Amino acid sequence: MKMEEVANGDGLAVPPEQLPFMRLGLERLDAFHDEVVDLEATLGDVIKLGGQDAEKKANKLIKQLRAFEPSITMIGQIKSGKTSLVNAMVGRPELLPADVNPWTSVVTSLHLNAQLLDDAPTATFQFFSQGEWDHLVENGGRIGELSERAGADDELEKVRLQIAEMREKTKQRLGRKFELLLGQKHNYAELSDELVQRYVCMGDDFEDMDEDDQQGRFADITKSADLYLDADKIPMSICLRDTPGVNDTFMMREQITINALRDSRICVVVLSAHQALSSMDMGLIRLISNVKAREVVIFVNRIDELSNPAAQVPEIRDSILQTLADNNGPENPEVIFGSAYWANIALSEDLDDIVEDSAEAMFNWAEAALSAETAGMETQELVWHLSGVPELYRALSERIAEGPGAEILSASRKRALNLVGGVRASNAVVSMRLDGDTVEIMSGDKLSAHLNELEAESLKSLDERLDIAFQQFGSRVDQSHKRFLDRALESLLQHLETNGEEEIWQYSPDGLRMLLRTSYQVMRRNVTATCQDVYGTAAADLANTYRSAFGVDVENFTITPPAPPEIPAPVSLGQTIALDLQTSWWKGWWKRRKGYRAFASGFYDLIEAETAPIVDELKVRQADDIRAKAKAELQEFHAEQRAILEDISSKSEVAIDDLEDIFGITAQQERDELFDYIFEELSDNDPVLAIGVNK
């Protein structure tokens, strides 16, 4: 781990202070970390017993455990206080600029407690590529695509003029370096607030900016920022990913946020207590509708600005849940209320800085929110508790521990069990040889050829069965797409026959999204079942190889197949399309059409072109990614088993006198007892594995 450094008043580099109460809500994460430490200790025992080859594999597992960094994507309304909340969560109130220009489209990833090499940067800023910039400038970005496709020349020209103005201001700030910077990356060894603001923050008055003022200099061409910080009250590595709002003029942020959601299993939606959820937030609702409800947490911020939080919070909660239910949002997500302002006040040195109205709201909320468990808290800790940040961390800790955390522990235990099984088989061969028994060993060449055959067969089987699953999925998606277009066109024609051309027709694309989501869920189940079957068959074949290659039968010996890869949520379904824009844009499209034929052909072509990228994303890119992950998991499994089997084969050819040096512990009975202990330790700590073993 590498401590980021910030200069204090004396010019000395010091870490930011982490206050003790920042541990509140992290208890489940502490327990998960303890499980990781216990597993590392067990792997340490495997190293002692298994010799050099086992040491390499066990150390690799330990390294993977330590590199585990679950990510949490923060999305929300513009001006909901999302960035202020992120600052409070990491204990750095001034780290990320909270008041930024609406152009800003930077995804900022805060890597807390990440394992870094000594010479690794603590801050990395990636600029948009030339192609991405050209897409925005020349085509008007996503909204430009839509306008051009619909023949909305006036709207497209307005978009281009706005972008041209932005481009000119950017060139004025960056000069001749502008073109050279696109696609580049800036790395820094030390992190400071001023550095972050140079790349993330944008002010509005660049014309009046002093030449020496670097604030926001690179912000409008910065695509992403990766910052590495220490947070000693958080017991493990996590990544908080702060995204821009989703309702920008050119829909740049929407696609950026979709990409960020792909990389995270857990999503925090930050709302303002004054706004709750409204029709303006349909883009936000569409995005979270495609994430598992359990993995969505809603944080309602700015309750410090309510006049009577104790009375208003229940009403706001009911309104949010009703809006989600009415618009096919996630069912019964956890909703937490709080105030990033209070959290940052709690982190400050002087609580008296709180504004009067906010203090009154806090006292009001305290009457409803405080309980017996908070009776012994100091004032600063009470304010932190009332801010809702501990409750948010509790929700996130549970989801990390029960989701990606449980998965990596289970996967690591499976690999460790297979490693132990291989070492035990190797030990059985050694024991037989030390006892003077003749051991019939498959030759190295024959073993290698057999393993090649097994791997080729299992990969072929996986590919063939995935072909079937993806073909079925593609057919369902195409059918759903066509049915939607046909139904929408029929609805349009009925509207024209009934109401004529003067009354503007509206048609929700939510039905298409639901059909595609259902098809995706079926595909997910089929792919998971396919992986389980193929992986299980591969594991059984490899277990038989141990017996046939070495003629030994180890008690409780089995090969545990890997878990199927986690299939990501279809977040691209949340992308805005023309039918979602029930605004002046759609009215303009309508008024430019005259005659039934113009409406029908124009509509069909527009919506088909609008929805085709979403369909292709699911059928092609996402399916290809899933296939690649499934094959990579199977190949890694075969590689691990090949290494163990070849190691046993090599041990069978070592001279008797050298065997003791290879294995370290000479007493075979003691080794067997220790193997039994490790086997039970790994199995008993994983409910899934324990069931499988007990069978």
Image (tube, rainbow, N blue to C red):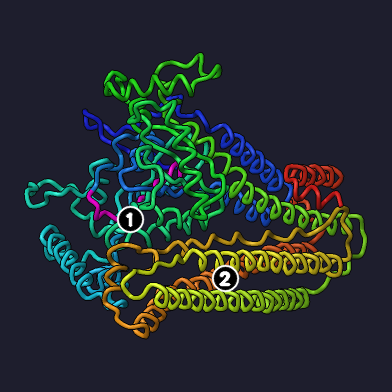
Q: Residue at x 50, y 44 (%)?
A: 321
> Looking at the image, can residue 109 be seen?
no
Q: Check if residue 106 falls in the magenta segment.
A: yes
Residue underneath mark 1 = 247
Residue 658 % position (x, y): 77, 56
Q: Residues within 10 Å of mark 1 (few under 14, many from 20)?
A: some
> Mark 1 falls on what kind of element?
loop
Horizontal relation, residue 527 to residue 210: left or right: right
Q: Position of residue 250 (x, y in %)?
A: 28, 63
| Residue 534: % across, % down | 73, 69
* Location of residue 471 by image quarter: bottom right
Q: Residue furthest front?
A: 498
Q: Secondary structure at mark 2?
A: helix
Would you place residue 110 above or below residue 538 in this image? above
Q: Is residue 688 above or below residue 233?
A: below
Is most of the magenta stretch helix, strand or loop? loop
Judge whether residue 378 is colored magenta.
no
Where 372 falls versus 306 (above or below)? Answer: above
User: Marks 1 and 2: which is nearer the front?
Assistant: 1
What residue is at 64 percent from the left and 43 percent from the top?
Answer: 40
Q: Which residues are magenta?
A: 101-115
Along the viewing direction, whichever of 461 and 12 lies nearer the viewer: 461
**Which sits in the foreground, 402 or 333?**
333
Residue 224: x and y in percent read 33, 56
Answer with left or right where residue 267 lies relative to residue 671: left
Q: Check residue 628 in the rendering and tell me which mark sits there, or answer none.
A: 2
Front residue of this view, candidates 402 and 160: 160
Residue 172 vs residue 460, the one in the foreground:
172
Kind of residue indicated by mark 1: Asn
